[in-house]
Each structure stands twice: as C-alpha cells, then as structure tokens.
Amino acid sequence: MQNRSKKLLNDFETFLQSHLPQTESFHPHYQKALTEMFQAGGKRFRPLLLLEVVDTYTPLLLPAAFHIAAGIEMLHTYSLIHDDLPTFDDADLRRGHPTLHVTYDQVTATLVGDALNSHSFYMIANAPLADETKIVLIKELARNGGAEGMVLGQAIDCHFENSPLSLEELSFLHMNKTAKLIAASLKMGAIIADLDRAEQEKLYETGLKIGLLFQIQDDIIDATFSSEEAGKPTQNDTVKNSFTNLLGVAGAVREKEALIADIETMLGEVDPELKERLNNMIAFYLK
C-alpha cells in the first residue's frame, strides 16, 4: 500500500475510533459491546475505496468524507455481527476476536447490530455536507445495504444453504450480499466529489466486479487458510454455496484472475490517478 493510502487509512482509523457511538446507562456492558468490533480492527476496505475517490478529486472534502466512510463501516460491521449469530453462521471468531454473542449473548449482539445499522445513517445525516448531497448518499447506502442489496443476498444465502446454486445464481447472491456495498462505497465517493452521473455509474459497475473479486478471495481464504491465519473460522463452509465449493479452489482462482482482467479493463476508463490507487488496493487486499 502506498504512503498516501496508508495515511488516509490511519487518519480514518483515528476519526472512526473517536466517533464511535457513545451512550450513558446502567446497562453493564452495552456501551463496551457497541465499540468492541471496531477496536478489534478490520480491513476498512469499503471506507478506503470512498476516501480514495474523494482524495483523488476533491481532497478538501476529506474531513466531511470521513463521516460518510464511518457510516459505511458501521453498516458493514452491523452485517458482520448479525452474520456471525447462531441463527446465521454461528461463528465464534471475527477479526481474531470472540464474536459478540460469544462474549456476551445473542440479545446483546443482535441489538448492537441494530444500533450500528441506525447509527450509520446518523453519521451521514450529521456530516458537514449539503443536505441535498446527504440525502443522495443516504439513499445510495440504504438501497445497496438493504432490501434490494445486502439483505437480499443474505436471504438467498440462508434459504439455499443446503441447495447447490448455479454459477449465475451464486454470482447474483454475492452481487447483492457483498458486491453492492463495495460498489456503493465507490459511487458515494463520486457523489461527494460531485462527479457527473456517467462517472458515478462507471465506478459503481467497476465496484460490482471488485466486490465479486473480494468474495472469491474470501472463499479461497476460507478453503485454504487456518482460522488463526484468517482471524475467523475457516474450512467450515463445505455445505454452503461458495465459489470454491462450486468450482474447486483451482476453478475459483481462474474466476478470480478473469475478474482481475475485467477490472483492469474497466479501470482503463477512469482518471489515471484513481486507476493507480484502486489497482494498488486490489494488489494489497485481493491478490
């Protein structure tokens, strides 16, 4: 990762840790549980996508963009907390840290996820940006993270857990569950930077491909890494619909390489500086 991106990531992490939700009550652990998954770390992949776009075109808006990036990371973290619950994946490890339902209980984990979902939109609503811009950003995050995006993907994933899907169906599943929030991160950066609609959509479509690449890489990690290496349970998705289960590890690697080639072609149509930044992110996180 290049120095500018490292600084962006470090500055965002400082901002995020100082803007986590704060509550006052006599509950014995609710406040601690609200912040625990953020303090356990994370790639911050989605916020960094947004920030790279803003920093390329309108770096003076970075302080405002941090609010939006934090909102995206909070929505993403809510989805992970819920995904780890016994009713879904029943995972006991996330980011090398015990999951919230293991440390506390299912009720606490569920409510913390609910709270972070709501707080993500609170972060955007309070960003120092024009109200018109914030409305568009809220609509974009809600659309891609909600009923016709991430939640739809999760519903399909759970319903068909023991029913093998075709490659087309599996791609549709992960286009919604994983890729749309990643694509929205790029598009929301473009909205903040006031790029024209065609540029916004170009970045969104590229983001969908990056999101599928992210998922394939995650499936490969699950199939080939230990839990200690990955920081979460692995080699436990043998009955789930994944690219490695459908195609085998070698087939998933070929699919990954094809996606990388598609993304490189699509990035040929964006600003050269942003192309370099995104290629560096892909090389750092996904190759």
Image: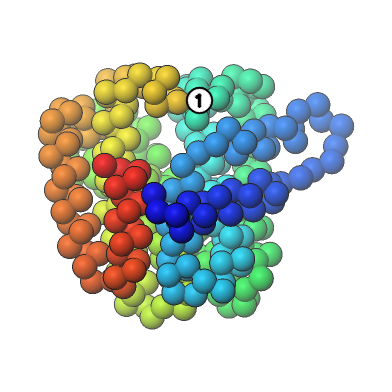
The residue furthest right is 26
Residue 24 lies, with reference to residue 104, above or below; the image says: below
Residue 129 lies, with reference to residue 248, above or below; the image says: below
Q: Residue at x 72, y 32 (%)?
A: 32
Query: In front: 83, or 196?
Result: 196
Residue 41 position within the rendered picture, expressed as x and y whole percent measured from the top left: 55, 36
Q: How many marks?
A: 1
In this rendering, position of residue 20 left or right of residue 286:
right
What residue would you read off at disc 1? 96
Query: In front: 115, or 48?
Result: 48
Residue 203 lies, with reference to residue 71, above or below; the image says: below
Residue 204 lies, with reference to residue 37, above or below; the image says: below
Give amino acid for label 1. Gly
Quadrant where the C terminus is found in the figure: top left
In this rendering, position of residue 218 left or right of residue 53:
left
| Res. 174 visible in picture | no
| Res. 217 visible in picture | yes
Residue 14 position within the rendered picture, expressed as x and y whole percent measured from the top left: 63, 49
Instruction: Name the image colouring.
Output: rainbow
Q: Residues within 10 Å of mark 1 (few under 14, many from 20)?
A: some
Q: Residue at x 38, y 80 (%)?
A: 196
The residue furthest front is 3
The image quadrant that residue 225 belongs to is: top left
Residue 74 position within the rendered picture, expressed as x and y whole percent measured from the top left: 57, 47
Query: In front: 56, or 120?
Result: 56
Q: Dot 1 lies on which element? A: loop
In this rendering, position of residue 216 left or right of residue 251:
right
Q: Residue at x 31, y 50 (%)?
A: 282
Residue 85 position within the rendered picture, expressed as x and y whole percent measured from the top left: 52, 27
Q: Residue at x 13, y 39 (%)?
A: 254
